[in-house]
Amino acid sequence: MIDAQAKLIERALQALGPKAVITDATEIEPWVTDWRGRVRGAAPAMLAPGSTEEVAEIVRLAQEHRVPLVPQGGNTGMAAGATPPADGSALLLSLRQMNRIRSMSAENRMAVAEAGVVLATLHDAANEVGMRFPLTLGARGSCTIGGLTSTNAGGTQVLKFGTMRALVAGVEAVLPDGSIHNGLSDLKKDNRGYSLDQLLIGAEGTLGVVTAVALRLVPAIASRAVAWVGLESPTRALDLLRHLEARTSSVEGFELIPQDCLDLVLKHVRGTRPPLSGRHNWHVLIEATTAAFDTDIGGEIERLLGDALEQRTIEDAAMAASEAQAEAFWKIRETISEAERAEGQTLAHDISVAVADMPAFLGEAAAKVQQAFPGAVASGFGHLGDGNIHFHVRAGDRAAPDWYEREGGEITRFVDDLVTAAGGSISAEHGIGQLKRDELARLAPTRVFHTPILGMIKKPAAKLPAMPPKVFMT
Ligand SMILES: Cc1cc2nc3c(=O)[nH]c(=O)nc-3n(C[C@H](O)[C@H](O)[C@H](O)COP(=O)(O)OP(=O)(O)OC[C@H]3O[C@@H](n4cnc5c(N)ncnc54)[C@H](O)[C@@H]3O)c2cc1C
């Protein structure tokens, strides 16, 4: 541990007490590796403040002692942004103790949750007052409101409700100089100048520590229809989405899944069963909801799928007959990454292109990757309606213990070049973290690096009077 860190830890202990300053290596250990288990870091201490004032105190101390902090929520991020550097130069700043829901108002359709509130906890609390926070994703049992805000997370209902950016009404955060920005407000409209809140969303902790967030709510779901569809191609899947969207506004989830991903789930995830009797090149999982108790949402979706079947847009479909079956369908979608991990090494690329271009991109990119790296298996699944696919390359016949280290970088650059040539983004919803930092620098158009922000993140501390090298590391 370097001297500056020891001094900071001692001062933090004096100011906040031992509950907020964890130096026991076994307690820190579970939090220094990223969710995918690819990036391992080290930190001599984990600071765990319980209030905004305590976060501010820690940031002021970090500033004074020039020690970088790595903010962390549930550590479920996919880009290793919450993992400290391996040289132990930074301290972890865990927001998990800040886990109060400060307010929940059905009248105002607004909740204020602290950064450490777990998404599933917020879902339950909103449901208790007849409301809903309409963003969800596979990590909902662990990911936090601070992490979701800081990565501008998307998830499976973006089609209808947008990403965090659309659902955050205001942010409270501690800024690099230790001051507190209070953007929490009950106002639905407020055009007084710039929105620092919007800048903090998706900043991955580089501009401040999010301590609480005002979140927009919608009425709770009265009923939902979940359907599994088999079809020939991503083009047909997009045809189906447009067919549905032209006739109903109730579709909020539309997930594309190739047969090979379904096969992996059936092979590795216990208790899963094929939703349809036959095999199909591609599958789509559809969720439609209504907040109106007198709407027969199941009947509506079944009728629309019947039309699509008649028009040969789709090959087969099954409506979930119960909540248990609906959950079983969703389990298949949400365990694809887990099944891939069980199968072997996988390179994950969270990419987006224009929605209309995605079907062609998927086929062409997979073919090009497999041609350039014979034996590897490329395929994509995910949020077709958002033009956002998780384009994964599995080692396949090229599998070797060092495959990831040996070829990972080259394959990822190959994929990222294809995405960039198609006018797409190499990070659709997972952020930059550590994993995509070099590729962002290599490929991002100049406008993405808004100069003053780049200055704060990348330039040497000497040019940044009020900013340590990186108070907030990503
Ligand atoms: C099974 C699974 C499914 C997923 N599905 C999706 C999906 O469909 N869509 C999607 O968008 N994402 C998905 N994710 C990843 C998603 O980004 C994270 O789940 C979530 O956004 C991160 O929350 P977290 O609390 O775990 O943040 P962490 O992983 O702890 O941190 C993520 C980043 O935010 C920063 N950060 C965390 N808290 C704060 C804070 N309070 N202030 C400032 N910075 C902070 C960290 O430094 C890091 O850079 C999935 C992850 C898993 C494991």
Image (cartoon, rainbow, N blue to C red):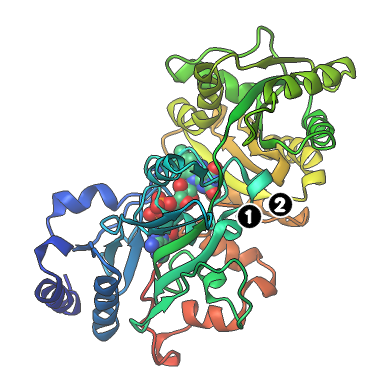
| Quadrant of residue 167 within the rendered picture | bottom right
Mark 1 → mark 2, Cα distance in angstroms: 7 Å
Residue 66 appears left or right of 282: left
Residue in the image at 35% along x and 50% along y? 74
In percent of width and height, residue 332 lies at 53, 24
Quadrant including the N terminus: bottom left
Residue 224 appears left or right of 108: right
Packing grade of label 1 (10 A; few <14, some 14-19, many >=20) is many
The residue wearing badge 1 is: 426
Q: Is mark 1 on a helix, strand or loop?
A: loop
Can you see residue 211?
yes
In percent of width and height, residue 86 lies at 30, 60
Tag 2: amino acid: Val
Tag 1: amino acid: Ile
Residue 47 appears left or right of 316: left
Residue in the image at 59% along x and 38% along y? 392
Residue 362 against residue 432 in the figure, above or below = above
Instruction: Compare residues 124 and 131 and report the one nearer the observer.
Output: 131
- Residue at the extreme right: 311
The residue wearing badge 2 is: 419
Question: Ligand 1 closer than 8 Å to the CB at disc 2?
Answer: no
Q: Is mark 2 on a helix, strand or loop?
A: helix
In percent of width and height, residue 12 lies at 16, 74
Packing grade of label 2 (10 A; few <14, some 14-19, many >=20) is some
The answer to whether mark 1 and mark 2 are in CB contact below 8 A is: yes
Residue in the image at 59% along x and 28% along y? 223
In percent of width and height, residue 251 lies at 70, 35
